[in-house]
Image: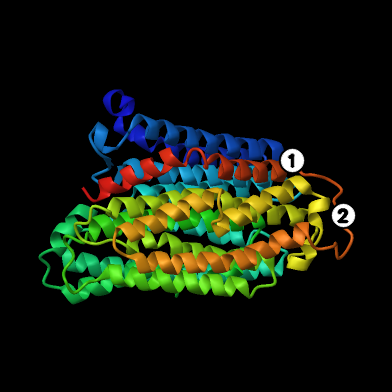
């Protein structure tokens, strides 16, 4: 209320602007001292910027900025951007993950070159993700997606002397370039059929367009672009390679924040530009997402169950979770009063996922710091040497599996309940079966660290402050969401319901 009544509307973008300004500040620092390896200062500036962004997003959410109760979304720059409850909700997710990644990178980058560039790229990518959540035009969505993607390609290949990292970065870049071309072509087809790129104008024009075939092909290609960004089938194959080869903090960043960004813009595009009330009868994108949700969660979980490498297991697991989040689009129907509930539940699941999945990958970063292997048996007996970190990893694994009383249980419960309430019980059933399957491979990690006998000597000479702190923050966030999940799901569903008004 305060922002909309007393402050300039442009300040509604403060969570994004802070990230961009922090990235520019790091560039200035790097230009003054190109060889700086002051990890504490660089990480500190990055973390302060991310936490400030989180503070703005939390303040605006609590004040009702951009929400129905205070007058609705704030349109900026000729309706190219809009700041509303959904945009701020996702900005909070991006800022939270960015802060944890920057804290962990303090130790991960110790004695490495190009530290300022690393943090700058992370913050620029987060800036692009924030703009994706606020995009109100297909053109803006494309530019924001590229701003998020281009730094990500460089970050995956950051370990320049590591063949796996460079190869992963190259594959990610090539596949990303193709998906961007498909996405841009889809936008051009939709523009040809509607004559507009602003979401509300696209929806209005679609309801009476004569070019249903052209528009339908455009919608399909745009959906393909989002499938790449969210690592959904059939554009998922880059994820295991990229996550395994990338520095572990970047794997956490991409699998959590980047995935959430893809869903943020997909939710807005398909509920506003391709609204079910306006889309021609020949374009059934809900059926498309139903197929994608089932195939993605099933393939991701079955592939994860066959892995022997823990990092690849988490990569395929993230594909499975993309399938769960797709229920937010797959369980929609025209005029249904449950649309806001099911999409809001998907948003809340992405928030919980941001903490538990980031924490899991940061635990892998911790084991890499100790030169522990990545296979399940390499973790045998680790609980006796690092009980606190392993207890946090146990929380992440059980929460990802959806076991009570962890945060992942509540987010999946509301997501599946939303699908059932919308009349798509079979989607919830498939999700529940896949969650049961996921317990098999998540429990393998827990069994290895707590039950199995050590298969070798662990050389745990130090407990890095940054990595430990980031893992503990992620674990605390996963646990704190238990008593606080009621307000979270209410806020998410309120923000989602506004999209269907």
The image quarter in which residue 141 lies: bottom left
Residue 167 appears at what percent x and percent y?
63, 71
The image quarter in which residue 159 lies: bottom right
**Viewer-proximal residue among 7 and 86:** 86
Can you say whether 356 is above or below 173 in the image? above
Circle 2 packing at 10 Å, graded few (<14), some (14-19), many (20+), is few
Residue 110 appears at what percent x and percent y?
75, 47
User: Between disc 1 and disc 2, whose residue precedes?
Assistant: 2
- Asked whether residue 125 is in view, the answer is no
Residue 104 appears at what percent x and percent y?
67, 46
Q: Are dots 1 and 2 in contact, CB under 8 Å? A: no
Mark carried by residue 465: 1
Q: Residue at x 41, y 51 (%)?
A: 347
**Viewer-proximal residue among 285 and 7:** 285
Q: How far apart in space, not on screen, are marks 1 and 2 (Cα)?
A: 17 Å
Residue behind mark 2:
459
Q: In the image as oriented, which residue stretches furthest toward the right?
A: 457
Circle 1 packing at 10 Å, graded few (<14), some (14-19), many (20+), is few
């Amino acid at each position: 209320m305060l922002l909309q009544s007393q402050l300039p509307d442009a300040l509604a973008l403060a969570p994004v602007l802070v990230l961009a300004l922090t990235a520019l500040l790091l560039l200035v620092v790097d230009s003054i001292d190109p060889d700086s390896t002051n990890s504490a200062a660089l990480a500190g500036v990055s973390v302060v910027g991310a936490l400030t962004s989180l503070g703005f997003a939390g303040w605006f959410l609590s004040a009702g900025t951009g929400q129905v109760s205070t007058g609705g979304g704030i349109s900026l720059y000729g309706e190219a951007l809009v700041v509303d409850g959904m945009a701020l909700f996702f900005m909070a997710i991006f800022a939270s993950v960015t802060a944890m990644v920057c804290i962990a990178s303090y130790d991960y980058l110790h004695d490495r070159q190009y530290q300022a560039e690393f943090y700058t790229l992370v913050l620029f990518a987060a800036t692009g993700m924030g703009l994706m959540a606020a995009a109100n035009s297909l053109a803006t969505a494309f530019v924001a997606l590229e701003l998020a993607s281009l730094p990500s390609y460089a970050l995956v290949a950051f370990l320049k002397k590591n063949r796996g990292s460079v190869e992963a970065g190259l594959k990610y870049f090539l596949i990303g370039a193709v998906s961007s071309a498909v996405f841009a072509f889809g936008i051009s087809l939709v523009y040809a059929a509607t004559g507009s790129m602003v979401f509300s104008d696209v929806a209005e024009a679609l309801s009476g367009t004569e070019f249903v075939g052209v528009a339908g092909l455009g919608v399909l290609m745009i959906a393909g672009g989002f499938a790449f960004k969210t690592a959904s089938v059939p554009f998922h194959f880059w994820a295991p390679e990229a996550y395994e080869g990338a520095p572990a903090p970047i794997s956490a960043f991409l699998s959590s924040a980047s995935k959430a960004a893809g869903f943020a813009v997909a939710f807005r595009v398909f509920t506003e530009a391709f609204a079910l009330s306006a889309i021609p009868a020949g374009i059934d994108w809900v059926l498309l997402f139903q197929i994608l949700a089932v195939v993605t969660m099933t393939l991701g979980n079955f592939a994860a169950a066959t892995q022997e490498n823990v990092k690849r297991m988490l990569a395929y697991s993230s594909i499975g979770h993309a399938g769960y989040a797709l229920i937010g689009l797959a369980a929609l129907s025209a005029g249904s009063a449950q649309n806001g509930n099911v999409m809001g539940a998907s948003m809340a699941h992405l928030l919980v996922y941001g903490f538990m999945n980031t924490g899991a990958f940061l635990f892998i970063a911790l084991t890499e710091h100790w030169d522990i292997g990545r296979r399940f048996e390499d973790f045998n007996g680790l609980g006796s040497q690092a009980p606190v970190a392993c207890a946090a990893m146990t929380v992440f694994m059980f929460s990802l599996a959806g076991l009570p009383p962890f945060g992942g249980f509540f987010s999946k419960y509301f997501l599946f309940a939303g699908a059932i309430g919308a009349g798509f019980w079979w989607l919830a059933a498939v999700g529940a079966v896949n969650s049961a399957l996921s317990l098999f491979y998540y429990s393998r990690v827990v069994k290895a660290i707590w039950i199995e006998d050590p298969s070798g000597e662990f050389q745990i000479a130090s407990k890095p402050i940054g990595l430990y702190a980031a893992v503990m923050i992620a674990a605390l966030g996963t646990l704190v969401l238990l008593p606080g999940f009621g307000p979270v799901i209410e806020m998410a569903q309120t923000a989602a319901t506004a999209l269907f008004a």
